[in-house]
């Protein structure tokens, strides 16, 4: 097979194992067998979590499918796709000239017995083209189309009407159809996954033949987000950020996420200071306490006091024991969202600040354009429209499904690992820093819509006056 050149992103979406694709350069249908990976590493925790979440949705964790990624992360390996191995598929051919059908057990037989793709009947060379159909099933199994059992010497042709069900096999020697178009078409095949489950005959270009499933994560390339998850007041910080409370300042984002020293360290420092003061002759207990209290603010680490400030503000808003705080503290998507929104590393520019810049620079053209953009955004109910110059993304292809792209109740639909006959299940992943756009739906417009349509009740005066202010 000739070498194929495709971008890495393309590989993740279209050339993962078991995918069938039309290879235009050689004008043939092919199937991906495997992908070689480079820079392979173990499964990162955040990816394991998202993977587990997706697999639970499919009920796909089990002995014959995916191992639990959170319990057995070492049964996975993650790497960059490097080289795609593919083969000619399917191996059922029809003669362009006389329509006779030819079938080969495997690619070796084809190469050995008919390297030139010559027709056995009319002897035309390079006349054989692949039959563009295959059997697929929702459980992931596939099968090649087959010619019904018949005398090997008879000349069998395929009457191709463009669709599996409407086409049929026909014996020219007997002058008899071997299958009938309609329900049967090119044949019926039962699947092992359930009683009376028939595989579906499908054209190869039908997208339902192979859906690649991917996961995307914000990937900082270091452990910044992972360390933030250890911060004990993360829930309050993220809620404060989400609600944009008064003492939440985006420029403090990094300070707010830093895992502060635990209470014990402050205590230690206080004890050391006490000893120091005593050695300098301050022995009066009351005076000592007073001095230490005065110095308390200097003992605390500045980041910690910012965190504590925000913490008490959020407690006042939602209550110190609110379940929202715990939920927020465990939510990686919320952490990713605020990281992307507020971390200076994103190099983000909000439309209003671009407009201000244009005003300062006296750039009339840019000013007019940004102003018009802003009006369009406002009309659509979009606010805080930003461009990000350095959005760090991890895109990972984790498996495939057929027939259904999402879990479907009452079926045997299943997501499958790309490769399951190796000690570790491969996950193909690409890390890249890309440009992105970020926007928010105007909360006032959303609230107004909910009220208008009777999905929410007006909560009271406070919000009414805020609404007037906001509008
Ligand atoms: Zn022929
Ligand atoms: Zn016959
Ligand atoms: Zn099945």
Image: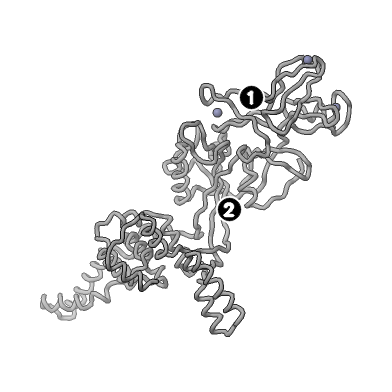
Can residue 110 be seen in the rendering of this structure?
A: yes
Q: Disc 2 designates what residue? A: 430
Q: Position of residue 423 (x, y in %)?
A: 54, 37
Q: Position of residue 271 (x, y in %)?
A: 21, 70
| Image side of residue 465 versus residue 100, left or right | left
Q: Is residue 393 above or below residue 25?
A: below
359 or 292, nearer to the observer: 359
355 or 428, nearer to the observer: 355
202 or 387, nearer to the observer: 202
| Image side of residue 134 versus residue 452, left or right | right
The quarter of the picture where residue 451 lies is bottom left
Name which residue lies at 31% across and 61% down: 458
Q: Is residue 146 above or below residue 399?
A: above
Q: Disc 1 designates what residue? A: 183
399 or 167, nearer to the observer: 167
The Cα–Cα distance between marks 2 and 1, rounded to whole angstroms, is 44 Å
């Amino acid at each position: 097979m000739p070498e194929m050149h495709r971008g890495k992103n393309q590989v993740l979406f279209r050339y993962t194992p078991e995918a069938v694709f039309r290879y235009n350069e050689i004008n043939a249908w092919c199937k991906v067998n495997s992908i070689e990976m480079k820079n392979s590493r173990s499964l990162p925790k955040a990816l394991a979590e998202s993977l587990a979440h997706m697999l639970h949705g499919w009920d796909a964790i089990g002995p014959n499918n995916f191992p639990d990624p959170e319990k057995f992360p070492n049964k996975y390996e993650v790497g960059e796709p490097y080289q795609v191995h593919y083969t000619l598929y399917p191996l059922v051919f029809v003669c362009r000239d006389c329509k006779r059908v030819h079938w080969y057990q495997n690619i070796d037989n084809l190469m050995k017995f008919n390297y030139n793709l010559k027709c056995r009947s009319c002897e035309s060379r390079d006349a054989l083209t692949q039959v563009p159909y295959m059997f697929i099933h929702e459980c992931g199994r596939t099968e090649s189309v087959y010619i019904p059992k018949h005398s090997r010497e008879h000349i069998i042709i395929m009457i191709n009407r463009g669709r599996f069900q409407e086409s049929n096999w026909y014996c020219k020697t007997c002058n008899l159809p071997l299958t009938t178009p309609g329900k049967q078409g090119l044949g019926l095949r039962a699947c092992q996954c359930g009683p009376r489950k028939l595989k579906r005959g499908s054209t190869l270009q039908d997208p339902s033949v192979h859906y690649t499933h991917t996961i995307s994560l914000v990937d900082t390339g270091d452990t910044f987000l992972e360390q933030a998850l250890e911060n004990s007041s993360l829930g309050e910080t993220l809620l404060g950020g989400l609600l944009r409370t008064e003492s939440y300042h985006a420029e403090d984002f990094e300070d707010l996420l830093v895992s502060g020293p635990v209470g014990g360290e402050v205590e230690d420092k206080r004890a050391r200071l006490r000893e120091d003061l005593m050695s300098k002759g301050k022995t009066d207990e009351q005076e000592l306490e007073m001095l230490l209290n005065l110095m308390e603010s200097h003992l605390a680490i500045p980041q910690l006091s910012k965190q504590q400030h925000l913490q008490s503000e959020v407690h006042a808003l939602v209550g110190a024991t609110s379940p929202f705080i715990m939920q927020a503290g465990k939510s990686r998507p919320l952490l990713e969202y605020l990281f992307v929104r507020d971390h200076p590393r994103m190099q983000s520019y909000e439309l209003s600040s671009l407009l201000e810049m244009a005003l300062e620079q006296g750039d009339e053209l840019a000013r007019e354009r940004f102003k018009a953009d802003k009006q369009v955004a406002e009309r659509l109910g979009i606010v805080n429209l930003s461009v990000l110059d350095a959005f760090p993304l991890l895109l990972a292809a984790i498996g495939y499904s057929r027939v259904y792209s999402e879990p479907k109740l009452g079926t045997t639909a299943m997501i499958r690992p790309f490769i399951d006959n190796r000690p570790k299940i491969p996950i193909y992943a690409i890390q890249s820093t890309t440009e992105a756009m970020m926007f928010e739906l105007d909360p006032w417009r959303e609230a107004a819509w909910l009220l208008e349509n009777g999905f929410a009740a007006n909560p009271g005066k406070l919000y009414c006056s805020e609404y007037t202010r906001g509008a």
